[in-house]
């Protein structure tokens, strides 16, 4: 048990104003200081003669001030010239300075300056070096100086002093079970921490920044292990939670299957089995259903829902946008109404009376299935007997919303669906508390999509191709560019594009849908497109997720270079759903940034969502992927999932063993790494 008497857990012994600043750095308990590790190191062990100092790396030089002046052109700045004992001189330039700084630059004062020398207008110079006034012959540092992450108002010397004193006070016991560090060839914890805070004299800055340094490896391992333990505990806690066993008898789902024009794929049957066997358990399911765009998740959701209804429970299905929710509503009502099942519809945009009616149906149990947006999460929604909550495009919702749902009375089973595949390393770490089912096969009869990269200069040819597609009886999407700086501008572009296309294609029906339209207007346009009354649909990225119109076979995406890979993949997946040969045209504008080039290459060369996600993770790191997971999941400060995958694997192997055989070690380890930070996804 972590106790307040434990010196590691005692709050920092500093003035309240400083405590507040340190809090921003995540420094609350005394032990947090021990784990506050340097970002990099500065070398103040060696003094360079000014004339011999290399360019392009930080160097320490020393000299006497020969002149100093405040200049006003091109802007206000302080220019100090120092001269070393060999007679070589160097300019120190400061843009930000206070009058009080001037004192130390009195003529003749000895100054030590640490910085990079570059060639300037007045000869060699350092801009904003780190400076110190010294006496002649002042000793040099005997080892490298750590530089810590910090915030305004907390200086490096303050941090160094706090950390140093804590290092001497803390016991820094080993949290791994006896012999474990050895057998994993890991450096002892205390040794690793001491080395990183106080590097021995013979270590260079390059050695110390090497992620393979045994000391760093040890800390990364400990961090990854804490994450694994915490995720496993969250998983366990959930398995101990109570949920209703849903014992469906298959009567409804059989009827739906019989009415479908297609048979389930093997992959759909497999994931459905996994879901249904979870629903029969007495603890809540938290299962993530992954399947590439178009893999047929909706019918799986419908069949899972029927299983819950057969058992006498209600089901909620949530989607992140009105368009998508509306489409699910139509589709599900179309499938379920013939079975005599009442489906109700709830979004924020309903008029008060309609909303009241929906709430009533949901509360008295008349509605067996409620489909809607975020509105379904709201407090005024009370189900009579909710057994299963399904969340589509899970990655677009925040974790908080997931939790709010769990608070309502009985804990429902949860099925989360996502077309954004989670790369393996993320699945092993940040998503380790969920069970995952994967639909790894597309329904038969799909035609592969041809992807073309086209310079925007060839727009007229693209418009001609749209016309040809329509002439063949198919339909086209035209997606307008994302303009992050201004929603108004984005809207304007969509309106303009719509006008241009309508003008260029006078014999075609061209529709427009964008985020600012009222929900019923949007729904009307989407319905007209689905019915084939519109042949071309100009859209902002509102159609990104889930829209399903099999007859659409052409997707044009303008300024594709501005979009992320997941988004491009989602958009492209709107076509290739019917039997017609489908094409996705990615229009781009030069010049392309390296990042844009890399992305376009990936989307051009790959159709497999998993491969795209993997490369995406490589290009941009896990941050954005984790958007929806961030709160409640222990984040990583030191480890890097791609680079440290073998440490991650080791931690993953050790975690269950430790939980089983060394519960006290688990407690000590989690206390060290996560105490004071959010540690569990509340189960
Ligand atoms: P997503 O996984 O992207 O949500 P959908 O559930 O929207 O995919 O399914 C895409 C399309 O494939 C829909 O038109 C759906 O009716 C159809 N579909 C689903 N399963 C099958 C199947 N087994 N055989 C043929 N078509 C299917
Ligand atoms: Mg879908």
Image: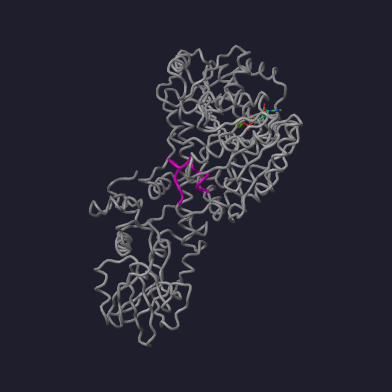
Residue sitting nearer the eye, 395 or 642 = 395
Q: In which quadrant of the rendered view does residue 503 lie? A: top right
Q: Is residue 226 left or right of residue 425?
A: left
Q: Main secondary structure of the magenta part?
A: loop
Residue sitting nearer the eye, 579 or 6 = 579
Q: Is residue 141 left or right of residue 370?
A: left
Count every numbered label the image shows and give the total: 0
Q: In which quadrant of the rendered view does residue 164 lie? A: bottom left
- Check the picture and name the quadrant holding the N terminus: top left
- x and y percent of residue 664 in the render? 40, 45
User: Is-magenta flag for residue 634?
Assistant: yes
- Check the picture and name the quadrant holding the C terminus: top left
Residue range in magenta is 622-636
Q: Is residue 475 left or right of residue 658?
A: right
Q: Is residue 36 left or right of residue 615?
A: left
User: Is-magenta flag for residue 302?
Assistant: no
Residue at the far left in the pictured view: 15
Q: Is residue 255 above or below residue 21?
A: above
Q: Is residue 629 above or below residue 636?
A: above
Quadrant of ligand 1: it is top right
Residue at the far bottom in the pictured view: 86
Residue sitting nearer the eye, 141 or 571 = 571
What's the colour scheme?
one colour
- x and y percent of residue 13 in the render? 25, 54
Q: In which quadrant of the rendered view does residue 95 lie? A: bottom left
- x and y percent of residue 189 in the render? 42, 58
- x and y percent of residue 157 in the render? 31, 65
Q: Is residue 21 above or below residue 377?
A: below
């Amino acid at each position: 048990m972590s106790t307040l008497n434990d010196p590691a857990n005692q709050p920092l012994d500093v003035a309240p104003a400083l405590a507040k600043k340190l809090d921003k750095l995540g420094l609350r308990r005394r032990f947090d200081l021990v784990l506050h590790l340097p970002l990099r190191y500065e070398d103040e062990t060696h003094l360079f003669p000014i004339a011999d100092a290399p360019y392009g790396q930080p160097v320490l030089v020393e000299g006497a001030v020969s002149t100093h002046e405040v200049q006003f052109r091109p802007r206000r700045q302080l220019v100090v010239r120092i001269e070393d004992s060999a007679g070589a001189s160097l300019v120190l330039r400061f843009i930000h300075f206070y009058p009080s700084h001037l004192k130390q630059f009195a003529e003749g004062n000895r100054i030590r300056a640490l910085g990079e020398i570059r060639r300037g207008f007045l000869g060699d110079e350092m801009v904003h070096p780190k400076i110190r006034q010294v006496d002649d012959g002042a000793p040099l540092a005997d080892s490298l100086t750590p530089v810590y992450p910090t915030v305004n108002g907390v200086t490096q010397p303050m941090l160094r002093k706090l950390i140093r004193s804590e290092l001497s006070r803390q016991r820094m016991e080993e949290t791994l079970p006896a012999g474990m560090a050895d057998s994993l060839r890991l450096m002892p914890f205390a040794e690793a921490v001491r080395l990183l805070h106080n590097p021995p004299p013979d270590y260079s800055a390059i050695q110390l920044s090497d992620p393979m340094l045994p000391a760093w490896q040890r800390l990364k391992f400990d961090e990854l292990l804490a994450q694994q333990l915490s995720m496993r505990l969250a998983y366990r806690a959930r398995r101990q939670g109570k949920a209703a066993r849903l014992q469906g008898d298959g009567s409804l789902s059989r009827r739906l299957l019989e009415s479908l024009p297609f048979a389930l794929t093997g992959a759909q049957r497999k994931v459905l089995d996994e879901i249904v066997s979870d629903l029969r358990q007495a603890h809540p399911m938290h299962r993530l259903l992954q399947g590439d765009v178009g893999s047929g998740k909706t019918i799986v959701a419908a069949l899972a829902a029927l299983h819950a209804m057969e058992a006498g429970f209600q089901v909620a299905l949530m989607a992140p946008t009105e368009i998508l929710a509306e489409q699910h509503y139509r589709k599900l009502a179309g499938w379920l109404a013939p079975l005599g099942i009442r489906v109700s519809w709830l979004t924020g945009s309903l008029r008060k009376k309609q909303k009241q009616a929906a709430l009533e149906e949901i509360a008295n149990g008349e509605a067996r299935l409620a489909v809607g947006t975020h509105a379904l999460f709201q407090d005024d929604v009370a189900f009579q007997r909710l057994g299963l909550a399904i969340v589509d495009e899970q990655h677009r919702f925040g974790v908080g919303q997931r939790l709010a749902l769990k608070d309502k009375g009985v804990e429902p089973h949860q099925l989360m669906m996502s077309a954004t595949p989670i790369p393996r390393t993320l699945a092993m770490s940040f998503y380790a508390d969920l069970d995952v089912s994967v639909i790894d096969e597309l329904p038969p009869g799909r035609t592969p999509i041809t992807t073309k990269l086209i310079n925007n200069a060839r727009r007229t040819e693209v418009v001609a191709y749209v016309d040809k597609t329509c002439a063949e009886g198919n339909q086209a999407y035209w997606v307008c560019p994302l303009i992050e700086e201004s929603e108004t501008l984005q809207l304007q572009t969509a309106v303009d594009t719509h006008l241009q296309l309508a003008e260029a294609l006078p014999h075609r029906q061209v529709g427009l849908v964008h985020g600012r339209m009222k929900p019923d207007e949007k729904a009307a346009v989407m319905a007209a497109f689905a019915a084939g009354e519109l042949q071309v649909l100009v859209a902002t990225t509102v159609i990104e997720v889930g829209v399903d119109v099999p007859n659409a076979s052409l997707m044009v995406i303008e300024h594709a270079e501005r979009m992320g890979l997941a988004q491009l993949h989602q958009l492209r997946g709107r076509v290739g759903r019917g039997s017609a040969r489908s094409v996705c045209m990615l229009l781009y504008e030069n010049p392309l940034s390296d990042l844009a080039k890399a992305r376009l290459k990936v989307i051009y060369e790959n159709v497999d969502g998993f491969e795209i996600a993997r490369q995406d993770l490589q290009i941009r790191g896990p941050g954005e992927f984790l958007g929806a997971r961030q709160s409640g999941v222990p984040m990583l400060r030191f480890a890097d999932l791609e680079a440290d995958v073998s440490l991650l694997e080791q931690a993953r192997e050790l975690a269950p063993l430790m939980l089983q055989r060394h519960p006290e070690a688990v407690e000590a380890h989690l206390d060290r790494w996560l105490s004071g930070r959010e540690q569990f996804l509340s189960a």
